[in-house]
Amino acid sequence: MSDGAQQNWLNMAERMNEAMARSVEQNMEAQAKFMESWADNAEGAMLDEDAMTESVESYTRAYEVWMDAADQMYERVTDAAEGEDVSLTEFRDIWLRSANDAFKEVMSTTAFAASQGSMVEAMMDLQKESEELSEDTLSQLGFSTRSDVDEVAGRLVELERRQQDVEDRLDRILDHLEDE
C-alpha cells in the first residue's frame, strides 16, 4: 500500500472512530434523557404495583431498542471501515427508527397514561386558578366579569321565559274573548 493510500485509510479510520464515539455519546445522552423523563412520569403518577411493573418492563424494552440501535451503528461503522459505502442518512434513520420504537414502548403504558392524566388535571387546576385571578382582578378594576355576564344572561333568559308565558296567557284571553 502506498504512503498516500495508507494515509487516506488512516484518515478515514480516524473519522469513522470519531463518528462512532460521537454516536455512542449521543446514544448515552438520549438514553439518559429518556430515563429521566420516564422516571419523572412514573414518579408523578402514583402507580400501583402492576402499573409500576408494566412501566419498568416498558423501559427495559425501550432500552433494548436503544442497544439494538447501538449494535446496528457499530456494524455499519465496521462495514464502512471495511470499505462498504455507508451513507450518513442510514445512521440518522437507525436513530430515528429507534427513538420512535423506544417512545412507543413507553407511551403505551398505564404509567404514561396516568402521568398524562395527572398533567392534564394539573393544567385544568392551573387554568381554573388563572380564571379566578382574572375574575378577581377585573372585579377590583370595576369591569364586568364572566360571572357578571353569566348572571345577566341568566336573568335575560328568565325574562324571555316570563314574557313568553305572558304572551301565551294573552293569546288565550284574546281567543276566549273572540269566541264569545
Image: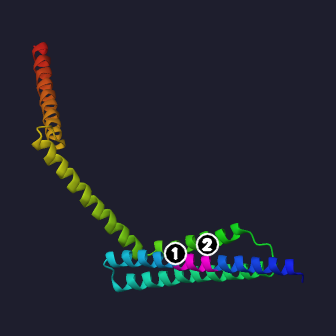
Left or right, residue 129 beside residue 5: left
Magenta stretch in the rendered image: 21-28
- Residue that mark 1 sits on: 30
What residue type is disc 2 on?
Answer: Trp
Which residue does the image show at 61% across and 72% down from the upper left?
Answer: 95
- Residue that mark 2 sits on: 95
Asked whether the beta carbons under mark 2 and mark 1 sit within 8 Å of each other, the answer is: yes
Which residue does the image show at 39% across and 76% down from the upper left?
Answer: 111
* Quadrant assignment for the C terminus: top left
Coordinates of residue 16 in the picture (x, y in percent): 71, 78
Coordinates of residue 112 in the picture (x, y in percent): 41, 73
Classify mark 1: helix, strand or loop.
helix
Question: Majority secondary structure of the magenta segment?
Answer: helix
Sequence-wise, which precedes: disc 2 or disc 1? 1
Which is more toward the observer, 111 or 69?
Answer: 69
Which residue does the image show at 44% across and 75% down from the upper left?
Answer: 109
